[in-house]
Image (spheres, rainbow, N blue to C red):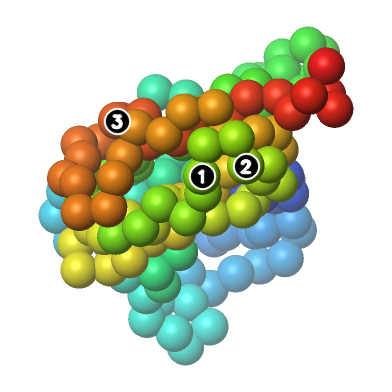
Amino acid sequence: MKYVTVINDQSYEIEIDNDGAILVNGELRDVDFLNLGGSLYSIITENKSLEAVIDDDEDKIAVMMGGQLFETQVLDERAMLLLQRRGGLKITSGEVNAPMPGLIVMVTVELGRNVAQGDTVVILESMKMQNELKSPVAGVVTAIHADTGQAVDKGDILVEIGPSSEDD
């Protein structure tokens, strides 16, 4: 089965054969993937052992690995074809949500500040790892719902980014 995943505006084609072989953009990858219970996984690839927390939530998947948080969508061939006919993947929300429960270590932005897509806006500690949560869009910080030391639940809105006055 073929899938397409988009991470940081880069698209990857992933094909998984019936025998478990994995091709990423046509290149064979040696990957051993094991569920350790719940959302915790062990991944062994290229002689490296990694742990990943994978949280599948409706329309996006959050992957925390190596202290970095990646938000992605994974689409099968049919869903990708439909999306391409509608104009492709577009991130329209400027909301930065907590991908998992945790404690706010730092809010790195201020109300009214311009941010670029990919700028770190919040640092969240979860499962003894600090994760940099990044702005999904370029714009201006219109609301901050989190404060240093605050405990948050999965899905809580932490920061809202709106269009900058230059975009109007």
Q: In this view, does 65 lie to the left or right of 71?
A: left
- Residue occupying image coordinates x 20% and y 68%: 128
Relative to 66, does residue 39 appear above or below in the rendering?
A: above
Measure the alpha-carbon separation of dots 3 and 2. 21 Å
Mark 3 or mark 2: whose residue is earlier in sequence: 2
> What element does badge 1 sit on?
loop
Identify residue for label 3.
Answer: 156
Q: Could you tell me which secondary element the residue under label 2 belongs to?
A: loop
**Disc 3 and disc 1: Cα gap in Å?**
18 Å
Residue at the spot 66% in from the left edge and 45% down from the top edge:
115
Depth check, front residue: 3 or 126: 126
Q: Residues within 10 Å of mark 1 (few under 14, many from 20)?
A: some
Give the residue type at disc 3: Asp
Pointer 2 residue: 113
For the residue pair 54 and 139, the one nearer the viewer reads as 139
User: Do tag 1 and tag 2 residues touch (Cβ < 8 Å)?
Assistant: yes
Q: Position of residue 63 (x, y in %)?
A: 41, 52
